[in-house]
């Protein structure tokens, strides 16, 4: 976007401006830079206005400043883009103002849509604090993910313990966010209290799930179903552009995988641990390689149709989910423990 603003031809810019001011002199044929090369000359801020229905409408304004001297005033030129949030307007129906407003030296345009001015990126403090611990989570994710993905069935009880631990830690963070995230000033200490509390309770619950294998297997399979639902959404379900499709698919995968353990125990464990392990491995790698969005941010971007804003390297992670999950299923099923069958005369 900055290149577009920095290399707008004066011929076009002044022609647009002439619809607002009749005393425009003949524009030059060279191009005008609307901002300097330094990043400080590009500023962003939140903006508000009264919408068409009388409600408060929010947005984001990007201003390019300290450009070339304006031929009318001699002062620096600037260019502004006001992007207003309207969740009822699909990305494909974005409203653009093709005629620049303002004056010849400081024109601006306006955009109104469900992307751009709307909050697509999650700024939840949960993600911020988890990001700080990425170097530690990364190595744990890679090592644990490898073991779960390729040896989940053979190491069933340790995996059941892991399922209980993850469930309690996730529940602790969710409870912390829902209850306290917007109501306390010192969120940092509270975050780590709940994370630590979830870990302690998770150790106890994990031990119980490893002891009661049937129940533990259902919980572990539920985590595998969650990861499968994430993969399905990031692969193709996002094209429906409905939030309820995301949540419905996640819930169906969780419940379906959990129920499958009571009918096809071994197959369910293989599928769930393969996908859970693949997810942990890939997420572990992303802690060091970067180019990854947390899942809920990704869903918002995809549902809004903001495909061009997605880092191309992100799709390598999606491919990694599928590849490692498939390899894990193949290896675990091929080398699963076989029941020993003896000849009736040897019994």
Image: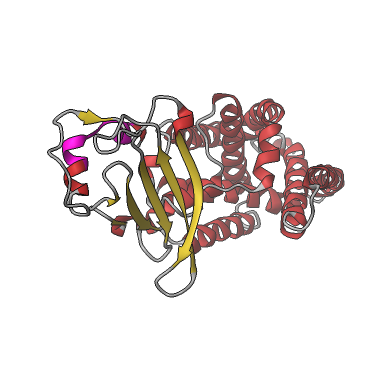
Q: Position of residue 312 (x, y in %)?
A: 40, 33
Q: Position of residue 318 (x, y in %)?
A: 46, 37
* Residue 101 in the figure: left or right of residue 332: left
129 and 155: which is toward the camera: 129
Height in image: 316 above or below 185?
Answer: above
Q: Position of residue 55 (x, y in %)?
A: 49, 71
Residue at 57% x, 35% y: name it. Answer: 278
Instruction: Name the residue furthest bottom.
Output: 53
Q: Quadrant of the N terminus?
A: top left
Height in image: 263 above or below 340?
Answer: below
Q: Quadrant of the C terminus?
A: top right
Specify the segment rendered in magenta. Answer: 3-13
2 and 206: which is toward the camera: 2
One can see residue 343 in this view: no
* Residue 54 in the figure: left or right of residue 70: right
Q: Position of residue 181 (x, y in %)?
A: 73, 54
* Residue 194 in the figure: left or right of residue 226: right
Q: Is residue 197 magenta?
A: no
Most frequent secondary structure within the magenta stretch: helix
321 and 242: which is toward the camera: 242
């Amino acid at each position: 976007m900055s290149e577009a603003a920095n290399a707008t031809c004066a011929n076009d810019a002044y022609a647009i401006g002439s619809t607002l001011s009749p005393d425009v002199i003949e524009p030059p044929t060279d191009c005008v830079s609307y901002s300097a090369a330094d990043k400080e000359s590009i500023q962003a801020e939140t903006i508000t206005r009264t919408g068409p229905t009388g409600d408060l409408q929010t947005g984001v304004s990007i201003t390019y400043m300290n450009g070339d001297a304006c031929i009318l005033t001699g002062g620096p030129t600037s260019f502004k883009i006001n992007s207003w949030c309207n969740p009822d307007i699909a990305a494909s129906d974005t409203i653009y103002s093709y005629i620049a407003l303002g004056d010849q030296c400081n024109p601006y345009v306006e955009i109104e849509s469900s992307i751009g001015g709307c909050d697509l990126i999650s700024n939840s403090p949960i993600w911020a604090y988890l990001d700080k611990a990425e170097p530690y989570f990364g190595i744990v994710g890679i090592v644990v993910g490898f073991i779960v993905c390729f040896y989940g069935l053979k190491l069933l009880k340790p995996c059941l313990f892991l399922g209980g631990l993850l469930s309690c830690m996730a529940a602790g963070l969710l409870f912390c966010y829902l209850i306290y995230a917007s109501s306390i000033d010192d969120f940092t200490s509270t975050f780590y209290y709940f994370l630590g509390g979830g870990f302690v309770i998770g150790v106890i619950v994990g031990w119980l799930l490893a002891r009661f294998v049937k129940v533990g297997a259902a919980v572990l399979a539920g985590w595998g179903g969650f990861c499968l639902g994430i993969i399905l959404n990031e692969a193709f379900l996002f094209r429906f552009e409905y939030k309820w499709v995301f949540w419905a698919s996640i819930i169906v995968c969780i419940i379906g995988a959990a129920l499958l353990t009571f009918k096809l125990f071994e197959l369910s464990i293989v599928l769930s641990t393969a996908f859970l392990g693949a997810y942990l491995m890939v997420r572990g790698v992303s802690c060091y390689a970067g180019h990854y969005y947390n899942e809920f941010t990704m869903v918002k971007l995809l549902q809004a149709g903001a495909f061009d804003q997605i880092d191309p390297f992100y799709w390598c992670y999606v491919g990694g989910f599928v590849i490692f999950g498939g390899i894990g299923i193949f290896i675990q099923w091929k080398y699963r423990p076989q029941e020993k069958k003896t000849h009736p005369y040897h019994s």
